[in-house]
Image (cartoon, rainbow, N blue to C red):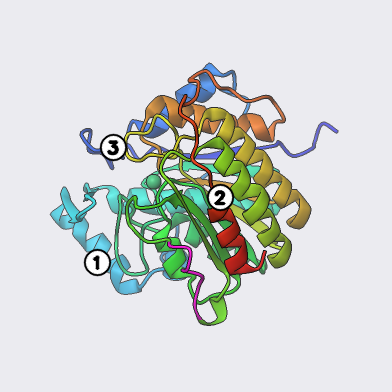
Amino acid sequence: MSDAPPPIALAVVASSGHDDPGHPEHAGRIPAIVAALAADGWGDRLPRLNVDPATEDALARVHDRRYIDALRAAMARAPGVIDPAPTYVTPSSFDDARLSAGAAIAAVDAVLDGRARSAFALARPPGHHARHAAAMGFCLLGNVAVAARHAQSRGIGRVLIVDFDVHHGNGTQEIFVDDGSVVFVSSHERGAYPGTGALDEVGEGAGRGATVNVPLPSGAGDAAFDRVLADVVAPFAERVRPELVLVSAGFDASFRDPLAGLMVSGAGFHAATKALADIAARHAEGRIAFVLEGGYDLPALGEGVVNVVRALHRRPALAALGRSERAEPSVEALIDAVRGRHRL
Ligand SMILES: [Zn+2]
């Protein structure tokens, strides 16, 4: 069938104006990904999606309108720092952040319309630390959260968000903490920024049980990711039966990343992608969209995204950067504790 939808389409937003060259979350990140894809032979083989800025109404589904107004107003005082992470803004940051959220929406639309089997919002600034009413952790607007609500506005019921960034997705968790219709699983490094994401944070009210946190020990890597996907995410998805899977895809869990201490390799991101695509195929008619979060070692960031693309095209992993030589700590007790806490 020549008209079968492509395995993956891209929504690319580089945000070259939202930049601080001395900051890890700088404007060279998206060009580095695009170059890595081209070097692996994907240059013109991946359809590009049109991206419009997220509307204020789309943003207001997850953010306080007073915060949106304050962020826009902060542009008049830019450049500056609006959160101690530090989270910087430049004069174009509000427009760039609206485009970044718009890329996540475009990825969801492509998947829901059947124009692509999956999609990846290669966009920045990232979003998963952004709170209901505050910027945080290099993040201005909650891109994946906006995308989840957008999907629901188009008739999707339950959305599963899986966040494999090395940092806890505290903003996403906060936005949906009492909502059982957007369920959230985060694996992250225990003790890393921002310090939230303990195993006993399980959601509140109607969202109780709809938040799953897996705080991994420093040094955990590919084997730990395999366990999280197979023994936590898959059985949790079996329970919630999502109609759409969204992935907060941060590549700072790489063994090369300067900001944290997990030890995932390119092959690990490839395996994780395959597991997530299998979950989407089983429950959500294959609908899955990836939204870029962190990833601050540029070669590892590029190789990570290449491995998402390769996995979705059923091509073998690229592991040119190698892997950590250190033995991984056991996560047996942790996985048992998470499964026990959530009766998985
Ligand atoms: Zn991160």
Q: Which mark is residue 247?
A: 2
Three-letter code for the amino acid on which mark 3 is drawn: Pro
Provide the residue designation for mark 3: 24
Query: Residue 136: x, y in percent?
Result: 30, 57
Q: Nearer the viewer, mark 3 or mark 1?
A: 3
Q: Quadrant of residue 23?
A: top left
Three-letter code for the amino acid on which mark 1 is drawn: Ala
Residue contact between numbered discs 3 and 1, judged by CB atoms under 8 Å: no
For label 2, the SS is strand
Res. 226 visible in picture: yes
Q: Which mark is residue 163?
A: none
Query: Residue 94: x, y in percent?
Result: 30, 54
- 184 left or right of 91 in image: right
N-term mark: 2 or 3: 3
Three-letter code for the amino acid on which mark 2 is drawn: Val
Provide the residue designation for mark 1: 70
State the extent of the magenta-drawn residues as a range. Answer: 198-204
Query: Residue 12: x, y in percent?
Result: 48, 38
| Placement of 281 over or under 22, stated as above or below | below
Residue 202: in magenta span? yes
